[in-house]
Amino acid sequence: MYEEKFQTSRNQIDKDSSNSCKPSSTNGYKKIIQNNRIKTGRKPGRGKGHKRSAPQISENPDEIKHISKVATCTCGCKTIDEKEVSRDLISLEVIVHTRRYTGMKTKCPCCHKEYQPHFPKELKSIINYDDNLKAAIVYLSSYCNVTNEKISKLLNAVSNGKINMCNGTTINTMKSFSAKSKAVLEKIKKEILKSPVINEDETPITVNGKINSTIGVFTKEWSLISAFKNRKLESFKEMGILDKYIGTVCHDHNAIHQNFVQSIQAECNFHILRYCKGEYEIHKRESIKNFMDYLLELRDKVSEKKAQNIKSFSDEEYEKSKKKYLELLDEWDKEFAKEPKNFSSQYYKSERCLKKRLRDYVDDHLRFLKDFRIDFTNNLAERGLRKIKTKLKIAGTFRNLNNAKYYCDAISIIDTCIKQKENIFDCLKNIFEGKKKIFAFWLLKMPYFQDRASFLHFKPLTSNILYY
């Protein structure tokens, strides 16, 4: 009996972030290999036909300087011209321009009431910063995760001491940006609601020493992240997407999604592979390995069909794949039943729960077969929330929940700029200037539904998938 308890404890100790749902912060000094990709055998470097990503010569240089050529070879012969070659030297000049507004302060001789001159409305204090500088502050604070103190020191250094900004200015700038970006965020939310497939994930954050939560919803064109006090159903409703969305939601098996019956659920299979790997390392069952191999085989089949411009499995192919999926689970059950009965039930608890989950949510796990717009994993949402984790590693915690919300608003807009290949700095500056049409909402690459009536015709569980 004691040996059984010891074995259960050993199994718990052996679990880490690579074979269970434990976070990477619990790995300690263990050397964990996080990269589970299979080697392709290709040589490193740019492949044949791949677009060159190295910097190119500027098309419109500010200055062109001609240099002398080599006229005589080392052998004594005169050289002949072949072609002109160029190399660019790029430099950065920081110009600090200060514009001072002066006016006469007046006073009423009768009631002694004082009046300030008619300053522009953006000049609210003695020292003010224009939209260019504010956009740079938002970019450094959110996307680059530079601390408030380092932003002040950086601007002071590059301006040769002309900009002496206090640390609180960064917080006030983020607050102002969040207030002015509400209209843009609402438009992003509307576009996400029109998308046939969205990816959703949550991650905890530390706010003033307490655990709060962030919820992110992502598509290939749009990103929206919000911070909340907890991860309860009320937070999801407050976000205003999942309680209204009627398409397919890909997530990591969050039970809260079962409350949103109007949407279709699709589950991340990468988490399943990770849990199966953990059980295989403990129990060494061949049936678990066969099940993992079959899921990867289905993923490769989908990739092959995508290359052939096929949009989904046929009903016959899907039923055949689902039948084999369940047969592999049956083999797993048979191998599980062969274990001696004197083992503690706690020893098999995680394996038993995993098998039940795979059987109960079989359609959710195989949803990617019926609509190839649904990804095999929820990696799109996990990549979107990775910036939050980077921020926490650098700063450790947010001072309050409002600061976390300001950060999430900025990250949502910047991440959307990157996906839509828009200039980040121009978008941030336009928001400060009060412009509302930041993104080309009418030029989406991904087709979407114009109204709710046409959206309801979208049937991911049938072979006749409508593409608009």
Image: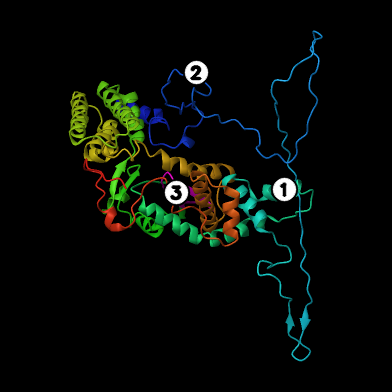
Left or right position of 54 against 453: right
Q: Is residue 365 magenta?
A: no
Asked whether 464 or 389 is in front, the reply is 464
- Against 309, residue 43 (above or below) is above
Where residue 322 sits, quadrant-wise, is top left
Asked whether 184 or 382 is in front, the reply is 184
Q: Tell me which numbered mark, 1 or 2, is placed earlier along the sequence.
A: 2
- The colour scheme of the drawn protein is rainbow
Q: Mark 2 belongs to which amino acid?
A: Lys
Residue 417 percent across, percent down from the top left: 52, 48
Residue located beneath label 2 in the image: 43
Q: Tell me which numbered mark, 1 or 3, is placed earlier along the sequence.
A: 1
Check the picture and name the quadrant holding the N terminus.
top left
Residue located beneath label 3 in the image: 222
- Against 299, residue 445 (above or below) is below
Viewer-nearest of discs 1 and 2: 2
Residue 53 percent across, percent down from the top left: 56, 31
Q: Tell me which numbered mark, 3 or 2, is placed earlier along the sequence.
A: 2
Viewer-nearest of discs 1 and 3: 3
Residue 38 percent across, percent down from the top left: 41, 22
Magenta region? 205-225
